[in-house]
Image (cartoon, helix red, strand yellow):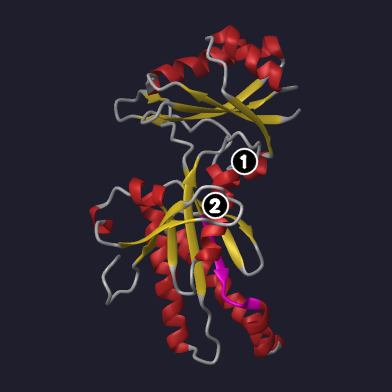
């Protein structure tokens, strides 16, 4: 049976409201040949996201209407493996046992995710210049640095693009720390291996999984890719939303304003910032 994600815009809702609505969906699901797998909720803007197995989009709208009346604003068909890669789970969070012995539902997180792209500078020509054996070694070192650093900052690798990675983060702050640490790690590598230098560019954006375009994190992914392509080697460039969302005081003086830039495939200009990552040059 196909899997779908839907998006509900309910600004006045609370986490308790969404938990109740999810329970009502579960109680009605069999009547419409559907199965609700899990949901996400962001109380800051009242965005609810459901993951559902259903025969079609109409069945999803019907069960929501019958259960509580809140019909989704958008519905998209999704691949379960990709949902897991981006969001980290495809079922409800595990229950939590309290010291009192009471078992309570696990915390439901927001579906907002940071999308990071990394790209190795001039990878084809650079690796050809190294020769076959060194090129393989260089790619292995590149992949090791990225995968190790991403894992250390709770990121999830969605895809290896060959000369870079597509990565998802639940935490804006951790994604920024990861981006800075990546550039420091490659700088250290280049200092120690001057015959095999590796320079990457990094681009970050944040968004929700269900959009009007019909692809999982469609616009968020496309914009992150364009931002990465706009960055210079050894640079981290982020969308304005990243600047606005980061919560930690350590980032207060870590951004340089690039300004509004028109990127390929986007009609409107996008506000961009560069993240200062050098240990001796401020930033983080």
Judge by depth and name the residue closer to the eye, 75 or 111: 75
Residue 63, position as x, y percentages in the image: 63, 13
Mark 2 Cα-neighbour bin, 10 Å: few <14, some 14–19, many ≥20:
many
**Front-most of residues 15 and 176:** 176
Direction top: furthest residue:
66
Q: Residue at x 40, y 68 (%)?
A: 181
Query: In the rendered image of this protein, does residue 83 appear above or below residue 10?
Result: below
Mark sitting on residue 216:
1
Q: Which residue is mark 2?
A: 223
| Mark 1 or mark 2: whose residue is earlier in sequence | 1
Q: Quadrant of the C terminus?
A: bottom left
Q: Which residues are magenta?
A: 116-123
Viewer-proximal residue among 155 and 179: 179
Is residue 147 placed above or below 96 in the rendered structure?
Answer: below
User: Is residue 124 left or right of 164 when viewed as pictured?
Assistant: right
Q: Who's the residue at 64% across and 37% down the image?
A: 213
Please check the rendered image and state whether residue 22 is part of the magenta-colored stretch, yes or no.
no
Up-down relation of residue 48 to residue 214 (above or below): above
Estimate the x, y position of residue 102 in percent, counting from the top left.
35, 23
Apparent side of residue 90 relative to residue 10 in the rendered image (left or right) = right
- Along the line of sight, the residue nearer the viewer: 221 or 271: 271
Residue at image position (46%, 65%) is 149
Instruction: For mark 2, give the secondary structure.
Output: helix
Q: Position of residue 264 (x, y in %)?
A: 59, 57
Numbered disc total = 2
For the N terminus, give its image quadrant: top right
Q: Quadrant of residue 96?
A: top left
Q: Which residue is situated farthest in the bottom direction here?
A: 195
- From the top left corner, tell me how far across and down residue 150 is, in percent: 48, 61
What secondary structure predominates along the stretch shown in magenta?
A: strand
- Between disc 1 and disc 2, the foreground one is 2
Instruction: Give residue 140's mark.
Output: none
């Amino acid at each position: 049976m196909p899997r779908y994600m839907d998006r509900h815009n309910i600004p006045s809702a609370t986490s308790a409201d969404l938990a109740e609505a999810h329970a009502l969906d579960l109680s009605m699901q069999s009547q419409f040949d559907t199965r609700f797998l899990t949901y996400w909720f962001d109380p800051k803007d009242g965005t609810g996201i459901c993951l559902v197995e259903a025969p079609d989009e109409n069945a999803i709208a019907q069960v929501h209407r019958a259960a509580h009346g809140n019909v989704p604003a958008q519905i998209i068909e999704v691949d379960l493996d990709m949902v897991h890669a981006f969001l980290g789970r495809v079922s409800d969070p595990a229950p939590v046992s309290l010291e009192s012995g009471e078992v309570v539902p696990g915390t439901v997180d927001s579906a907002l995710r940071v999308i990071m792209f990394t790209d190795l500078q001039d990878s084809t020509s650079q690796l050809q210049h190294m020769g076959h054996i060194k090129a393989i070694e260089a790619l292995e070192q590149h992949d090791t640095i990225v995968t190790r650093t991403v894992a250390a900052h709770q990121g999830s690798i969605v895809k290896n693009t060959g000369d870079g990675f597509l990565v998802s983060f639940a935490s804006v702050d951790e994604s920024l720390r990861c981006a800075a640490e990546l550039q420091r790690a490659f700088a250290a590598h280049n200092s120690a291996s001057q015959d095999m230098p590796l320079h990457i560019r990094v681009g970050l954006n944040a968004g929700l999984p269900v959009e009007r375009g019909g692809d999982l994190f469609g616009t968020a992914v496309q914009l992150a890719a364009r931002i990465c392509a706009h960055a210079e080697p050894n640079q981290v460039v982020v969308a304005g939303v990243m600047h606005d969302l980061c919560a930690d005081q350590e980032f207060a003086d870590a951004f340089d304003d690039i300004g509004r830039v028109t990127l390929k495939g986007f009609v409107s200009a996008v506000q961009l910032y560069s993240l200062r990552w050098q240990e001796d040059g401020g930033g983080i």
